[in-house]
Amino acid sequence: MNHIMASGQAGSRNVRPKIPVGKVIVIVLLILFALCTLFPLLFLLINSFKDQGTIVASPMSLPSSWSFTYISSALEQIHFGRAVWITAVVTVIAVALIVFCSSMLSWVLVRSRTRSSSLILLLLTAAMLVPFQSLMYPLIHEFEGMGLKDLTGLVLMYGGFGLGMSVFLYHGFIKGVPMALEEAALIDGANIFRLFFGIVFPLVKPITVTVIILNSLWIWNDYLLPFLVLGNAEVKTLTLELYYAKMLSGQFSNPWELIFPAVLVSIIPVVVLYLFLQKYFIKGVTEGAVK
């Protein structure tokens, strides 16, 4: 009897829980997607520590030494310190302008509930469908006529182009903010600014982070608008410095030992920003999708 019970217990210990086939397929697909996403970053990293000949001959091999010689050379050629400072200033001011204007405008549009507010929201969201190429030359011409073909004009353009998507995101999120909180604050004597910045704005923090990340990634990596506005001026953004450094080696040549290290150091700030704020970004996207 004891032998049978012991055999039964041993048999039950050997039984392993079955993993559903569908779950295994999903895990394998996620691993493949992750590898496809991370492969360009790995390719960029290993080729940032090689010379021109090694990159061309064996782009998939590991570097013989992890020397920072090519990275330091790239930093000097693209004037990294000055370019990062200019790009950071433009990005921070433009994103702050977008967040300030779009959050307040969205709140007014949600709470007013009039035909004009619906029409304004429709026009802002429809503006996202207009191709930039169709209006870039008239836009540059008008800003040049106003004497704003400089960093100030660049920031204003970014603020205008980022307004449509940001208002769309804020509008959907603010509709879920309870009206009772604002009514209680009004009864306590809060004015309009105290009502928005003290009550509403802290409640929309997840979507604010989403707006910050999306616009920061776009503005930091943008090339076309700085090229049209700044051109070959003394002050250049990071992408412009990289472009003109590449052009110095010839129109049809590819200085890979400059391009790979320069691109690597240029993406580090936005990657750090995303890793720091990714928790709020995912929360903002998911809650915004539900609402």
Image (tube, grey):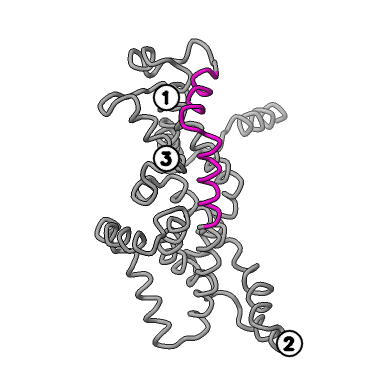
Mark nearer the N terminus (3 vs 1): 3
Name the main secondary structure of what is drawn in magenta: helix
Foreground mark, 2 or 3? 3
Q: Are marks 1 and 2 in contact (CB under 8 Å)?
A: no
For residue 258, which numbered disc appears in the image? 1
Name the residue beneath numbered marker 3: 239
Q: Is 159 on the left or on the right of 249, as rendered? A: right
Name the residue beneath numbered marker 2: 189
Residue 286 picture location, percent across and down: 51, 59
Residue at 75% x, 86% y: name it: 188
For residue 118, which numbered disc appears in the image? none
Number of marks drawn: 3
Residue situated in front as seen by the camera: 258 or 22 = 258
Q: Secondary structure at mark 3?
A: helix
**Residue type, numbered disc 2:** Gly
Mark nearer the N terminus (2 vs 3): 2
Mark nearer the N terminus (1 vs 2): 2
Residue situated in front as seen by the camera: 46 or 177 = 46
Residue at mark 2 to residue at mark 3: CA–CA distance: 49 Å
Looking at the image, the residue that sits furthest to the top is 64
**Residue type, numbered disc 1:** Leu
Kindly tell me whether residue 210 is visible in this rendering.
Answer: no
Q: Quadrant of residue 56?
A: top left
Residue at 35% x, 59% y: name it: 144
Please tell me how crowded label 2 is: few (under 14), some (14-19), or many (20+) other residues with Cα within 10 Å. few
- Give the magenta-colored segment's residue range: 68-93
Q: Secondary structure at mark 1?
A: helix
